[in-house]
Amino acid sequence: MTKPTITIVGLGPIGASIGLALKKSGGDFEIVGHDKEPTAANKARKLGAVDSTSWNLISATEKADLVVLAIPISSIRGTMEAMAPDLKQGCLIIDTCSVKRPVLEWADELLPETVSFVGGNPIVNLTELEPGQSGTDLANEDLFKNKLFCLCPSIRTSPESVQLAADLTATLGAQTYFLDADEHDGLVAGVEHLPLALSAALLNTVTQTPGWREMRKVAGDTFMRASDLSESGADALREISLSNADNMVRWIDDAIRKLYELRNAVRESDEEYLTQMFDEVLESRTQWLADKARGFAGEDLPKNPETPSYWKSLFGVGGGFRRRRGEEQEADKKKRTR
């Protein structure tokens, strides 16, 4: 019986790392990779993240039992639209974008009812890996280990598909974190998208002044860290801003108010305010790093099973996925003919 197929669309650091982590798990499945950049596809194949690659999106996804969209949000809608007519009945699709509400809306609009969709967002830090590297070179089989992986199921997603998505995150070594899409986007706007906006504002402020030619010579580590937008292209930054606009506006307004408070304290030499503010923010960051290091233990997060049973029944035994899906499809067919 043919092995079940997992297709990863987008073989950058996230997609290639998913492939490596799946390979490490030792499941009985075939991993197909697709990337519009031949260099990324070749690197992923040489790394062993995928068993094969296909330059054609339809060829890569039409036989897949599970499709992972590890691509920027600017490419999601077009990709869904292109592959939708040829997707296999019973296929599960997961994405990895940092904005969830529009992605779920596109999935409900474009994907056939015969497939399931679960929105995903792995909370990882690529800067923890090798400095100076980028793209597929950053792929690591342990990238998701002990990290949170947010899941936002569509309202029409079956419980079995939701469980399969959770089992996937557990197989990657991550901790599953279920969220409503609106809640997810509101939270992420403050800690992922606002920092991008502030970095862009910082760069726009200093690089567009007449003094930039001299300023750039004394720009050191602080400026480097505060202005780092290297992993995000202009298209992705634009789409993130517009696709989460209401939350972005709210967080930017809050940041503006805080900047005005800081501005006034500096202008008035308010030492008490500045000392208290810097003490509080440094303490908050220290506590966050400590909580993050222990995996937010004791907080309201589900505990992943040591052996994801549903995943094992579908992908751990040759032909399991095909057999189980075939049974589900046959049952659906009988219901429709009654």
Image: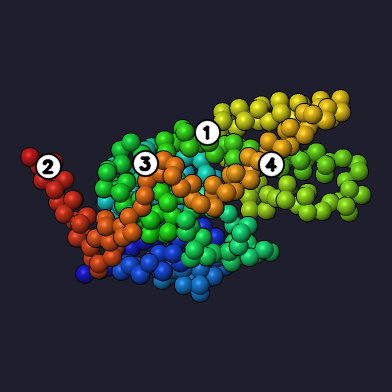
Q: Position of residue 83 (x, y in %)?
A: 39, 51
Residue position for label 1: 186
Amino acid tagged 3: Pro
Chain-order first, disc 1 or disc 4: 1
In this rendering, the answer to whether 203 lies above or below 130 is above
Residue position for label 3: 153
Q: Position of residue 275 (x, y in %)?
A: 77, 34
- Can I make out residue 215 in this image? yes
Query: Residue drawn 51% across and 52% down?
Result: 294
Q: Which mark is residue 175?
A: none
Q: Is mark 1 on a helix, strand or loop?
A: helix
Quarter of the figure with residue 247? top right
Residue position for label 4: 282
Taking the view exactly as shown, the residue that stands out farthest to the left is 338
In this rendering, the answer to whether 192 lies above or below 44 is above
Q: Which mark is residue 335?
A: 2
